[in-house]
Amino acid sequence: MKQYTRKQLKEYVRLGLARDLTEVDPDTLPKWYEKIGVSRGIYGMNGGLIWDKVTGEYGVILDRSSNLFRLF
């Protein structure tokens, strides 16, 4: 997996290239996805980028939330 900074992941959302999945309902998270990359800090993983195989959209998780640990 590729390493990203949180700033890069936020930029993907700002430009509309990816959908923010940080606070969505866990039932709406993609079921079939591929992990593209992660963002790591001093306390471990703090963000991630996935690709939804069904819709072809990218998704970003920007914080250390429960959705991050469900997908990664």
Image (tube, rainbow, N blue to C red):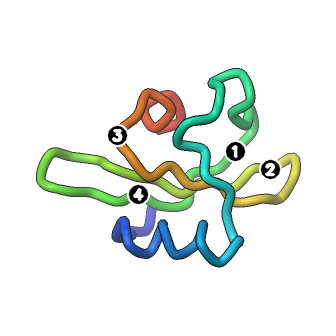
Residue 40 image point, x, y percent: 27, 57
Mark 4 vs mark 3, CA separation in Å:
12 Å
Query: How many labels sit on residues?
Result: 4
Looking at the image, is mark 4 or mark 3 nearer the viewer?
A: 3
Counting other residues with Cα less than 10 Å from the Cα at mark 1, is it few (<14), some (14-19), or many (20 or more)? some
How crowded pointer 2 is (Cα within 10 Å; few <14, some 14-19, many 20+) is rated as few
Question: Local crowd at mark 3 within 10 Å, few (<14), some, or many (≥20)?
Answer: some
Q: Circle 1 is placed at which residue position?
A: 33
The mark that comes first in sequence, 1 or 2, is 1
Badge 1 element: strand
Q: Amino acid at mark 1?
A: Tyr
- Give the quadrant of the N terminus: bottom left
| Residue sitting at the far top | 27
- Identify residue type, mark 3: Arg
Q: Residue at x 51, y 32 (%)?
A: 67
Q: Mark 4 or mark 1, which has the lower sequence index? A: 1
Residue that label 2 marks = 53
What residue sits 35% from the left and 60% below the top?
A: 39
- CA gap between label 3 and label 1 equals 19 Å
Judging by the rendered image, the residue that carries numbered circle 4 is 38
Give residue 3's quadrant in the image: bottom left
- Alpha-carbon span between mark 4 and mark 1: 14 Å
Who comes first in sequence, dot 3 or dot 2? 2
Cα separation, mark 2 vs mark 4, equals 18 Å
Residue 10 lies left or right of residue 51; in this view the side is left
Q: Which residue is mark 3?
A: 64
